[in-house]
Amino acid sequence: MSEMDGHDKDKKDHILVIGEKESFLIRVLFNKLSGAGFDYAFAPMDISSIADKWEGTELVTLYLDKDEQIKPEILSFLDDMLTDSGRQMIAIANEEQLSKIKDSLHRSLLYQTFVRPLDAQMYLDAVSEFHSKLAAGEYRKSILVVDDDPTYLGLVREWLRDYYKVAVVTSGLQAIKWLGKNKADLILLDHEMPVTSGPKVLEMLRSDNDTKDIPVMFLTGKSDKESVMQVVALKPEGYLLKNIERKELLDKIGDFFIRRPRIDQ
């Protein structure tokens, strides 16, 4: 996972503004962003330029002036980049252009849209609102970690907390109770737990309509072939060995969220 996946609370977001050219109106937006303490960059509307300026971006602004047409391959590229990085976009255009953008991008990727002519203060208010929500962790994925070892729970929570909203419980029954009031995008479930084992908890989750679709990855301390095959036979979304290092854990979870199909809310 790259450093941009974390959020530095001491620095305001980096905004990538994409347009055909750095027009007068785009410079007006830059003045607003600069005055409010936001970092920003401009990229012309071609794939290589956008890719070159992407690193560190927290929010994208797509600005279409007059009757400019955006190429389908650009929209497809933006859809992929926003999805893979977990970022969102503000689109500014006329109604016809916005209709095309909405048809081309998954709706969860569009934070807000504005019809030209644009009120620059309204744009800044939207960026500031996004910044506040991002700083509060509102856009982070939620992970529930279930393990009977408090020490291990504390370690995993420390590793994940800069990138995800993390909740921890020490038993399967506590997990079921927590899920009755909260939502999780992923469950990391200890396979070898006393009283209610990991497989039993998975069975309970899969039998409940409210939790049956929550992805589950098993945590296991056993790496021998027979033990691993027993875990895999339960058909979780994956399994992680408990001796995994921090970076590998973050990489595997990050890769999982990138690959996981998006579901309309």
Image (tube, grey):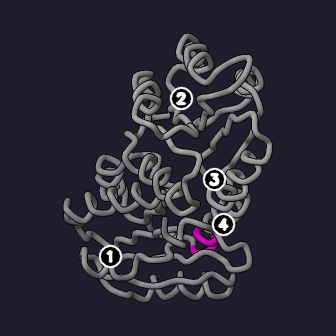
Cβ atoms at labels 3 and 4 below 8 Å apart: no
**Above or below — where is 44 with respect to 135?**
below
Nearest the eye: 14 or 190: 190
Give the structural element (helix, strand or loop) at label 1.
helix
Which residue is most to the top? Answer: 207
Name the mark nearer the viewer: 4 or 1: 1
**Above or below — where is 138 with respect to 16?**
above
Q: Quickly name the residue at label 2.
A: 214
Question: Measured from the top left, where is residue 110 in percent x and y?
Answer: 46, 54
Q: Any mark on residue 51, and which?
A: 1
First along the sequence among labels 2 and 4:
4
Q: Does the magenta-highlighted stretch encompass residue 87?
A: no
In the image, 245: left or right of 257? right
Which residue type does callout 4 highlight? His
Q: How would you classify the magenta stretch by its main secondary structure?
A: helix
Give the structural element (helix, strand or loop) at label 4.
helix
From which residue to which does the magenta span run?
120-125
Which residue type does callout 2 highlight? Ile
First along the sequence among labels 3 and 1:
1
Q: CA distance from mark 2 to mark 4?
A: 28 Å
Q: CA distance from mark 3 to mark 4?
A: 16 Å
Question: Measured from the top left, where is residue 255 in percent x and y?
Answer: 42, 52
First along the sequence among labels 3 and 2:
3
First along the sequence among labels 1 and 2:
1
Give the structural element (helix, strand or loop) at label 3.
loop
Which residue type does callout 3 highlight? Tyr
Name the mark nearer the viewer: 1 or 2: 2
Nearest the eye: 240 or 80: 240
